[in-house]
Amino acid sequence: MQDLTITPEQQTIQQKAREFTAKYIIPVDREWDERGGFHEFILAENKEVGLNCMAVPVEYGGPGYDSVTQSLVAEEWGYGCAAFATTLAGNGLSSYPLAIAGTDEQKKIYYGRLVDGGMGGFALTEPGAGSDAGSCATVAKLDGDEWVINGTKCFATTCGHASIMVVFASTDPDKGVKGLSAFIVEKEREGVVVGAEEHKMGIRSSNTVELRLKNVRVPKTHLLGKEGEGMKIAMKTLDMARPIVASVSVGIARRALDEAVQFAKTYLDVNGKPIAKHQAVAFKLADMATQVEAARQLVRSALRLKDMGVPYTKEAAMAKTFCTDTAMRVTSEAVELMGDYGYSKDSVVEKLMRDAKVTQIYEGTNQVQRIVISGLLLNS
Amino acid sequence: MGYAFTEEQEIIQQTAREFTQGCIEPVAAEIDRAAIHPQELVQSLAEQGFMGMFLPEEFDGAEAGFLCYALIVEEISKSSGAVASILNHHAAMAAYSINAWGSKEQKDQYLSAMCTGEILGTFAFAEPDAAPGVGEAKVIARKDGDSYSLNGRKCYVANGGEAGVYIVVALTDPDVGTKGMSAFLVDGDTPGLSVARTIKKMGLRGCQSAEMLFDNVKIPANNLLGAEGDGLAIVAKAQAVAGVAEGAMVVGIAQAAMDDAVKYGMQRIQFKQPIARFPAIQTMLAEMATNIHMLRLAVYHAAGLIDNDEPFTAEAAMIKLFAARIGQSALIDVVQIEGGYGYSEDMAASRFFRDIKGVITKNSSIDFPETVIAKSLLD
């Protein structure tokens, strides 16, 4: 399957990611889903092929891939396993705040860890602050030359294994959203405590933990941007992250489609003919394929806007919503089409369906995306 | 909700509701986690009279009708899809078929014991890699004097390994293909019948799914259910009846999940108010409430047709089609409303999400429901 709409360089990297996924992820996807725990081994392999710090610019030791290239890689990871993709793409997500607001010194610290093969984390959500990020109860107070951070984050992706994180805390709780600030926090800082791990229905080998910060002291210089810019940084980060989540979702959907096509071609009906010969089945596959293609192109067009340097917030939110909804729908249809086999753990599609559900929830629920999209529609 | 139930139906519904709350709800999550057949609980179902609810009193059934049975299945499904699934394969698939097609001797031998819970029943129809009777694993029954011997493999056998009697659909005349299929009553302890492996699945995990090996399984010729060649007709009828009961399962699971989402939505505060106050959440709840109500009406209606001995095949197929369409979408929305919390394995929502998929996934159906419905329109 050669994609002629992308450049030869992009094709080469896509191919590399595809081979990486086929070699290291697909053979163990169901095993890791079953046993849970963190698939730490993939980090070294990912570093080996040079996909570990995709979002890091060339001057800081990264490959400096354009956005479309990053999305091609994310789709391949998603095709393999959404849990692995969440870890690997999360490394990019956690570094976006640096790209948005980091100083040269901050970038050297943060990107340095990623280039060395370390993981980055992004801690925004709290028990009382999900979609409503402004209700953040984690507080940072300046004490001499240091910020002292206190609070509890939840659903923090990869934070049990991250070497460095971006943590959001309020520097002025009275101001709500406008009092939110972003900080770089290294794992080894005293008072950083990794709490209970979530047992999830899907993406089970992705690490999701509670993160407690007890009098965590970081240098004054670890504040990203200015005080009160946290929400702005978080929103821009999510703008950048959404097309990547969307791409992972396209990968999930494409895998489900491939599995369903393979099944339909080989599973024989009562007359001894492949079920794909039934128009009802063939049309279902056609619809699934159409949705996957439409989803992929919606991400691409959002990312082309981004690479051109023009506003793409609305398109990114549209891509996130449409692609994740597509992943949910297509995986669900694949299970149904494949019947008892699809529902059993002999097949991968039931896992794809469990995995797909989280994509509608994380990185801003699809309800939040609709707030973003409708806001831009109605207020422009 | 003002359904026109008889007093008996209301009492049975209430009994099932209390039994479910008291005996199933406390262990439902554990049944899912352990994925082990809940033997004691199944025995209590029998003690409640649930396992023979619509079967004749002559054979120790309650003879209370299929609507009563659907009401029980709906209630049980509110706590455990797995337990409802065990019951359905036993009652709506196996016991129904024996009552509908069995000889006097067969009924005497099996039905009472199935109503009292002494024998758990089920169907063995699906085969690996192809429709039954088509693939390499196909089960063939060869007649030899006054016995048949069965060879081949069945898979996705619900209650597999736990059942005392299996209705096995096998080829008796391979030359005419699947038209030459017949149904047999095979005791669970018949030599040559064994569980090759237990199949793990996404949900309904307390209801076993087994791949079963038939290695020269020899049964008396009078264990043939119906006549030779009746196999597919027996399956089609059983799947139609079970389809109505599965509709009741989808109603029960979706209702319980929706109730859970409403509770969560009223407790979860974001932007200084319960999220259930947001129109976006209310729209999802309104949609699922409407769909559940419509499906429930269709299930009660079709159950009434069964009780009145009227044709119900098209209605059963409509239930299958509609349940598949609205069941999963309700659960996708319930988990969405509950967000990261609903996605947790420790929460009921994620279990309901996995379970409902197993009910609506077409279980090696002979026909697509669309085909059955269209046929009723065109013929």
Image (spheres, coloured by chain):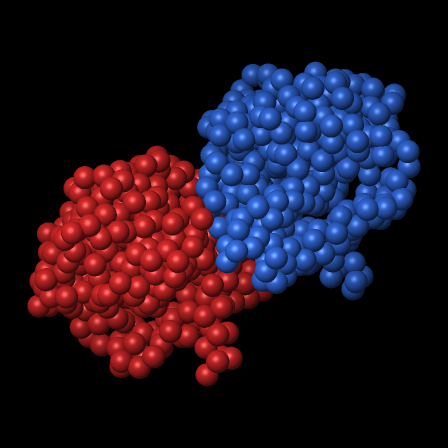
Colour chain B appears in: blue
Q: Percent position (x, y) of residue A323? A: 43, 65
Q: At 49% from the left edge and 68% from the top edge, which residue is drawn?
A: A371
Picture quarter containing residue A14?
bottom left
Q: At 18% from the left edge and 39% from the top edge, which residue is drawn?
A: A190
Q: Percent position (x, y) of residue A297? A: 38, 74
Colour chain A appears in: red
Residue closer to the observer: A250 or A222: A222
Picture quarter containing residue B240?
top right
Count the marks: how many? Answer: 0
Residue closer to the observer: B100 or B290: B290
Q: Percent position (x, y) of residue A56? A: 16, 63
Q: At 61% from the left edge and 44% from the top edge, which residue is drawn?
A: B263
* Side of A102 relative to B110 (left or right): left
Q: Quadrant of the N terminus of chain A?
A: bottom left
Residue B38 in view here: yes
